[in-house]
Image (tube, helix red, strand yellow):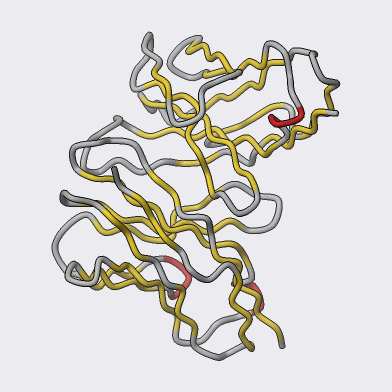
Amino acid sequence: AQSVTQLDSQVPVFEEAPVELRCNYSSSVSVYLFWYVQYPNQGLQLLLKYLSGSTLVKGINGFEAEFNKSQTSFHLRKPSVHISDTAEYFCAVRNTGFQKLVFGTGTRLLVSP
Amino acid sequence: NAGVTQTPKFQVLKTGQSMTLQCAQDMNHNSMYWYRQDPGMGLRLIYYSASEGTTDKGEVPNGYNVSRLNKREFSLRLESAAPSQTSVYFCASSEVHGTVQETQYFGPGTRLLVL
C-alpha cells in the first residue's frame, strides 16, 4: 500500500521569504505525485503534478516541486511567498497500478506581513 | 463552465436522519469521486465511479451509499446519520480513472454537522 507523510502540520513564514513544504511517500512501485492547494472555505485546486520526465516540476502561482526517487520525496517550494499564499497544501500520490489517489494530512502555510 | 458543483453548502442533521449530497460536473468527465475531509486526516476516499454505471468502495465506505445517476451526476447518501459523519465532503471528477493523465478536479465542498 502507498502512503504520504507531510511532517509539518503548520508552517509560519513572513511575506517575501522562501518556503519549502515537505512531502515523503511510500510505495513499492512507480508513482505519480501531486500537490493541491485549498484556500479557506474552498475546494482543492491542482498546483502541479509529476508524471514522468524532468524531476523539477513547475506549477501555478510560482510554485515548483522536485521529485527525488532515492529519498522518496516531493517537496514543494516557492522562492518568495505572498500573503495570498496562505492556505492548506496537500501532497498526494497515485501509483501506476493501484489507481486511487492517496492524500497526506496537509500543511497549513501561514504567511504574515 | 461551472466545473464541479455541490449542494447543499451546509447542512445540520440530527442523529438518525437521512440526506443526500448532490454533485454535478459539466466537464464531460467519465470518473467521479466522493471524499471526506477531517482535521489531521487529509482527504479519504468514500466511493468512486470509474465510469457511468459503475461504483466502487473507497477507503471509508461504511454508512454511505452512492448513485451514479448519469454521466454528470454522482450523489452520496447517508441513510442514518451519525455524529462520526460530521465532516466536510468533497466531490471530484476526472477524465478517465486510472490513466496517466488523470487529474482530479474538486467541488467547493459540503459542510455537514450531525448532532
Image position of B71 with respect to A101: above or below: above
The image shows residue B64 at horizontal and vertical percentages of: 58, 18
Left-right relation of A58 to B79: left
Residue at the image position 73 percent from the left and 19 percent from the top:
B81
The image shows residue A5 at horizontal and vertical percentages of: 42, 60
Image position of B94 with respect to A76: above or below: above
In the picture, the quarter occupied by the N terminus of chain A is: top left
Residue at the image position 56 percent from the left and 49 percent from the top:
B41
The image shows residue A20 at horizontal and vertical percentages of: 45, 79
The image shows residue A6 at horizontal and vertical percentages of: 46, 64
Q: Nearer the viewer, residue B37 or A15?
A: B37
Left-right relation of B9 to A21: right
From this viewpoint, is residue B1 visible? no
Hey, which quadrant is residue B71 in on the image?
A: top left
From this viewpoint, is residue B8 visible? yes
Hey, which quadrant is residue B75 in on the image?
A: top right
Image position of A63 with respect to B101: above or below: below
Left-right relation of B77 to B94: right
Residue at the image position 46 percent from the left and 11 percent from the top:
B70
Q: How many marks can you see?
A: 0
Q: Nearer the viewer, residue B32 or B35?
A: B35
Image position of A51 with respect to B98: above or below: below
In the picture, the quarter occupied by the C terminus of chain A is: bottom right
Q: Nearer the viewer, residue B21 or B24?
A: B21
